[in-house]
Amino acid sequence: MITSAIGQDVTSVGPGWDAVGRYLFGPLILRGILVTLELTVLAMAIGVGLGIVLAVMRLSPNPVVSWVSWVYIWFFRGTPVLVQIFFWFNLNGVLKVIGLGLPGTPFFLLFGHTNTLISAFMAAILGLGLNEAAYMAEIVRAGIISVEHGQTEAAQALGMTRLLVMRRIVLPQAMRVIVPPTGNETISMLKTSSLAFVAAVPELFTRSEQISLATFAVIELAIVASIWYLVMTTILTIAQYYVERHFARGALRELPLTPLQRFRRMLFTFHAPPPAPAELPVLLPRGH
Amino acid sequence: MSGTPMVKAEAVHKSFGRLEVLRGIDLEVQPKEVMCMIGPSGSGKSTFLRCINHLEKIDAGRLSVDGELVGYRQRGDKLYELGDAEVCKKRSEIGMVFQHFNLFPHMTTLDNVIEAPIRVKKESRAVAVERARKLLERVGLGDKVDAYPRQLSGGQQQRVAIARALAMQPKLMLFDEPTSALDPELVGDVLDAMRDLAQEGMTMMVVTHEMGFAREVGDSLVFMDGGVIVEAGNPRDVLSNPQQERTRAFLSKVL
């Protein structure tokens, strides 16, 4: 009996590829992918938007504004994103209503009750997005300070306001420095969004985990999830190439070819045959 | 001289930390005058030029352009610094050309020239483009409207920068060593463009090392050293017959 059990184990070693194939396009998995993409896009939107604001604040000549940004980055970069998602998910335990107020002023804008405002999905978005903003702020700041100061001066000399200088002159040039690490962050976010699992958000990893619990095909579902994560990061990598190319305008004398253009050129360019070697005078020995 | 001077400086002081860069500058530039400023590096001439459009704040004294204080408003006998929007409005009436051109590299030549008229003066695109084309034509770059700055030579870039400043129809043009970063054979085209501008009656202040230009085009010449004006007057007189020892020493090195 023991041997037969071992025998059975031996035969079932290795993942069941048929199970992988079965679940790869399963409806739950596909819906999970959609949620993962939603999480990534929304969290990155918050991250980039708030990150730009924080970066500009950090570089402000006003010390209070700069300090607020510094504290934000210090806090959200210094605590684990998993804990932050957890925090937002369980906030209703300590806060019943949510609003926006300025400390020291009577201004308070009531948004609503915590339970209705912060769903599991919202908790994940907040946790991921607010954390990301801290990282993006530093990336954007690096981009801004990489733009030569003469650009700001020239724009100011033309009468452009500080905001206009930032929006029209500095940020577009900073993009060249900002885009590559932002691509990095987006790819990272795609995978980090699986932490939404702790808030039971039905994204790709949560779904695959749920299916594997029901079917015991743990490794198979992990493979299914990995395949999809790889597919999505690959698409993002390609998208990043084109975004970078867009912001290279003016920085390079000539834009590099896209892979498609290079491929076409390879197929349809016929290189002229090399010129025939000039006839060398042949010295023949006498007698021939 | 009649009317308000275009630029009037009274006891202008400026320090960077402990270093006193300007130690009491007094001068007047009349409308249509071309004033050239010369002096050794570190003498404060570029800093003074940058104070005129408030790229640098002055620490003491008064500086006014066309009768209005630069960057400040007077209330009683105190000066209050203006807000960003008001400073920008004043700056939009003063053109500036930099040593390193500072064209916007992510925009074409045409976009460089129409950017401020559209965004700052709120001109319509059609009007701005028409003027920009004329200006680029005038500086000899009518065929380069779609080029990016990095595709142009230094001399061409500087002429675009002049067109960009002129597109705002300024009443005063400031030139901060406009030919110092150029290869010698490219200097001529830029000086020609500036000479044309002077002949059309533009008020100009030019920080330069081009003594020939100062002699030919300048109406007045100022020699600065150590943050003060050492000598000023008619360019021919100052250059050929300097009265001060420091002026003589400087000219003997550069001429």
Image (cartoon, coloured by chain):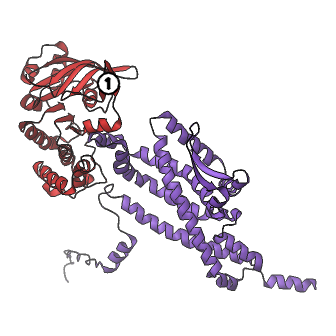
Please give the residue where the numbered disc 1 appears in the rendered image: B58
**Furthest-right residue in view?**
A1
Query: Where's residue B147, x and y in %?
Result: 22, 57
Dividing the picture into quadrants, the one containing residue A272 is: bottom left
Dividing the picture into quadrants, the one containing residue B165 is: top left
The hue of chain A in the figure is purple
- Image quadrant occupied by the N terminus of chain B: top left
Dividing the picture into quadrants, the one containing residue A43 is: bottom right
Q: What residue type is labelled 1?
A: Ile
Residue B242 versus residue A135 in the image, above or below: above
Label 1 CA crowd tier, 10 Å (few <14, some 14–19, many 20+): many
> How many labels sit on residues?
1
Question: Is residue A142 visible in this depiction of the protein?
Answer: yes
Front in this rendered view, residue B136 or A113? A113
Residue at image point 32% right, 44% down: A151
The hue of chain B in the figure is red
Question: Is residue A216 visible in this depiction of the protein?
Answer: no
Front in this rendered view, residue B79 or B37? B79
Query: Where's residue B232, x and y in %?
Result: 14, 19
Residue at image point 70% right, 78% down: A220
- Image quadrant occupied by the C terminus of chain B: top left
Query: Where's residue B229, x and y in %?
Result: 21, 18
Query: Where's residue A25, x and y in %?
Result: 61, 82
Residue at image point 16% right, 23% down: B28
- Relative horizontal placement of residue A96, taking residue B91 as reference (left or right): right
Callout 1: SS: loop
Residue at image point 50% right, 71% down: A235
Kindly identify which chain the residue marked by label 1 belongs to. B
